[in-house]
Amino acid sequence: MENNENSYHYLDPDFKYTDKNGLLHNLANIQNEKVLLAFESLKVTKRVEEFLENPIKLRILTHCLKFIIICFKMFISGQDKLEP
């Protein structure tokens, strides 16, 4: 892992969430940091395009909170699309 101002080192002595180099485990099982960065960038870009094509209309704060919870659950589970 590069050692610069933007680096962050996780405290995970049992390597439950990171590998020996401090790289977080990921659902795609990508070990190379540069490949992972490209993969995540493409996934985020794809997701932004989906939201631009099919925006979710939010009317009140509770809808915003529900939306954030749904997005977080999708991120954690590795799900690519919203289920109806």
Image (cartoon, rainbow, N blue to C red):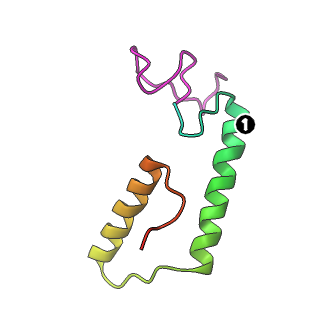
Q: Which quadrant: the N terminus?
A: top right
Q: Is residue 75 above or below residue 33?
A: below
**In screen coordinates, is 51 left or right of 60?**
right
Q: In percent of the image, x 41 and y 21: which residue is there?
A: 11
Res 59 → quadrant: bottom left
SS state under label 1? helix
**In screen coordinates, is 49 left or right of 75?**
right
Q: Is residue 75 magenta?
A: no
Q: Which residues are magenta?
A: 1-24
Q: Position of residue 8 (x, y in %)?
A: 53, 29
Q: In percent of the image, x 44 and y 18: which residue is there?
A: 15
Q: Position of residue 84 (x, y in %)?
A: 41, 74
Q: Pointer 1: residues within 10 angstroms few (<14), some, or many (20+)?
A: few
Say which amino acid is labelled 1.
Val
How many tags in the picture? 1
Query: 4 and 79: which one is in front?
Result: 79
Q: Position of residue 10 (x, y in %)?
A: 45, 25
Q: Is residue 52 above or below residue 68?
A: below
The residue furthest left is 62
Query: 8 and 36: which one is in front?
Result: 36
Dominant SS of magenta comes to loop
Q: In percent of the image, x 69 and y 28: which residue is there?
A: 32
Query: 36 and 2: which one is in front?
Result: 36
Residue under pointer 1: 35
Res 53 → quadrant: bottom right
Q: Position of residue 61 (x, y in %)?
A: 29, 76
